[in-house]
Amino acid sequence: MRDARTTMDLPVAPDARHAAARYYRPELDVLRFIAFLFVFMTHRADLAPIDQARHPWFHAFAQIGVYGVPVFFFLSAFLITELLERERSATGTIDVRAFYVRRILRIWPLYFLVFFGLVLLNLVLPGAGADSPAKWLFFTLFAGNWYITFNGWIEYPVNPMWSLSVEEQFYIVIPFLASLGRRALVAVNVAVLAVSYGVIVWYARGFTTPPGFSGQWTNSFVHFQFFAGGMLLALALRGRRPDWHIAARAGLWSAAIAAWLVASAVCGIKADYPQSTVTESLAGWGLVLAGAALMLVATLGTPQRFLPAPLVYLGRISYGLYLTHIFFFWLVYDKCKPWLAGLGGDVGMLLAFAATVAVASVLYRTFETPFLRLKRRFTRVPSRD
């Protein structure tokens, strides 16, 4: 859900001059916003169900919206691997301490502001935030996804924060992995993919904890496949970006959506209660991974003239959009339901979207930006978050 600005095409083996150049790809900000929209539609359907008979395609797209989270994971791994490879090319090493400081300054301030802001709000608006010391501890230690995995979903506005726990767990190891060198890094990521699909098979064979709830969707080992995929793609491209006609890019996007629709409708890959066989699980999760990869390569290198400035901006503030949108959905569809009766679910969705964009924009300008400026002091390869 973050990162960077550049205008150059890199050769297969970028030298130190290229590695030190400013890196920013505005088209990937657009991809971030699209990933957020997928998640946004899923949460809308959670609280205001879509009539499948009347709106089959709307319903189908809402069902695959959960796969927006893997896109965030895939994109994050791709960008960070690219930046670390450039840093190593430019300096001969990777500054692990600076990496951790950059990630802390990027992720922690807004995360803790929203999480503990909801905890305080829960005192006057029950259901708004985590309501127990155990939840506070797990989410403070970025292990919130494991709490949900073994206990089930918690307060609705807090649930999406499980993905930040998975990302932070990835950030712990990636600078060390990147230090191994290309061949070792490829081997490690192939092993990670094998572990991920081993865990997927384990779930497909009937493992559930607690009884009746599948913790598959929030299990770190399941989602590590997307980080491995993003890293492998970055290593394969070596700084290059596809120079394709816009029609080819549209075709790849169509293929990605088709892969996701099959994963959901045929293979049963769901966020809550998957009912897939081993074969369906392996095929379905593979299609989710393939869809995320296709979306990234279809977007990477898109000419500036095809990138509407408002979408680039919305992608830049997508972190705030992601953390806050679920609260506004809950507020509109749960707490304000008596006042919105008869207006329809679409009105509530528009209200929630408008409030989310407004709040995320204010947070980005007034709260996130000072930390991003401080973060640049620890940047070895100039980029833009």
Image (cartoon, grey):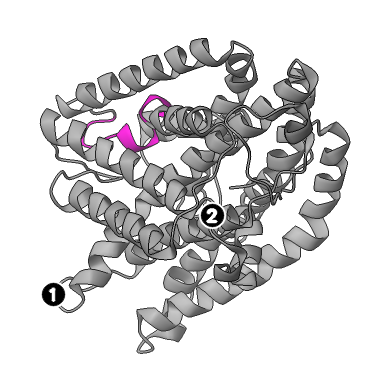
Query: Mark 1 belongs to which amino acid?
Result: Ala
Q: Which residue is most to the front?
A: 11
Give the left or right position of residue 123, taking residue 22 as reference.
left
- Residue 116 in sight here: yes
User: What's drawn in magenta, residue-wise?
Assistant: 210-222
Q: Secondary structure at mark 1?
A: loop
**Which quadrant of the view contains residue 150?**
top left
Q: Which residue is most to the bottom?
A: 342
Residue under the point 74% across and 60% down: 363
Whether residue 62 is in magenta: the answer is: no
Q: Label 2: which residue?
A: 32
Foreground of the two, 300 or 335: 300
When the figure is inspected, residue 41 is found, relative to residue 238, above or below; the finding is below
Query: Mark 2 belongs to which amino acid?
Result: Arg
Residue 73 x/y as whole percent:
49, 39
Q: Label 1: which residue?
A: 53
